[in-house]
Amino acid sequence: MEDLILMARAAKKRMKSNFWADCKKNADEHTVAALNNGVSEMRIKNSIAERVQSEVRGRREDEFYLKVKALLDTEGEVSDAIGRLTDREVYDKLSYEDKQRYTMEISTKYLAALNRYKKEKELKL
């Protein structure tokens, strides 16, 4: 029941802060810019829709993506990205099998973040 109340409060807050009007304005501006740059209108709208959905669900830009973005902005794609993104305190406490699993999870998350980063750079978001 508390979750429902929190969701209702968040929705009310979005309505009071003109969240949806701002989203519409943002989408329109990016769509016009995309059309001027020759980028598909549907691609830009899908990208903006994904971002708005994640905000509404409460998953703001996650910490891992921000780490990946900072790494890519400063140094570009590096060969030891997985090692740099690994939390050593957590990693050192794991068993051999858990270390393998953790590394695979980091790798999967990194590839998803890399694709998101490239998509945003391509669409200039």
Image (cartoon, rainbow, N blue to C red):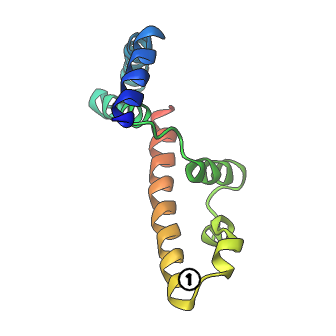
Res. 58 in view: yes
Of all residues, the one furthest to the bottom in this rendering is: 96
Q: Residue at x 50, y 31 (%)?
A: 125
The residue singled out by tag 1 in the image is 99
Q: SS of the residue at dot 1?
A: helix
Q: Residue at x 56, y 50 (%)?
A: 65
Where residue 26 appears, as percent x and y from the top left, is: 44, 17
Position above or below: 37 against 22: below
**In the displayed structure image, the side of residue 81 where residue 22 appears, left or right:** left
Q: Residue at x 60, y 54 (%)?
A: 68
Identified by mark 1, the residue type is: Lys
In the picture, the quarter occupied by the N terminus is: top left
Position above or below: 93 against 33: below
Where residue 21 appears, as percent x and y from the top left, is: 39, 10
> Residue 13 versus residue 54: which sits nearer the camera?
13
For residue 99, what is the image quadrant? bottom right
Q: Residue at x 36, y 23 (%)?
A: 8
Position above or below: 88 against 48: below
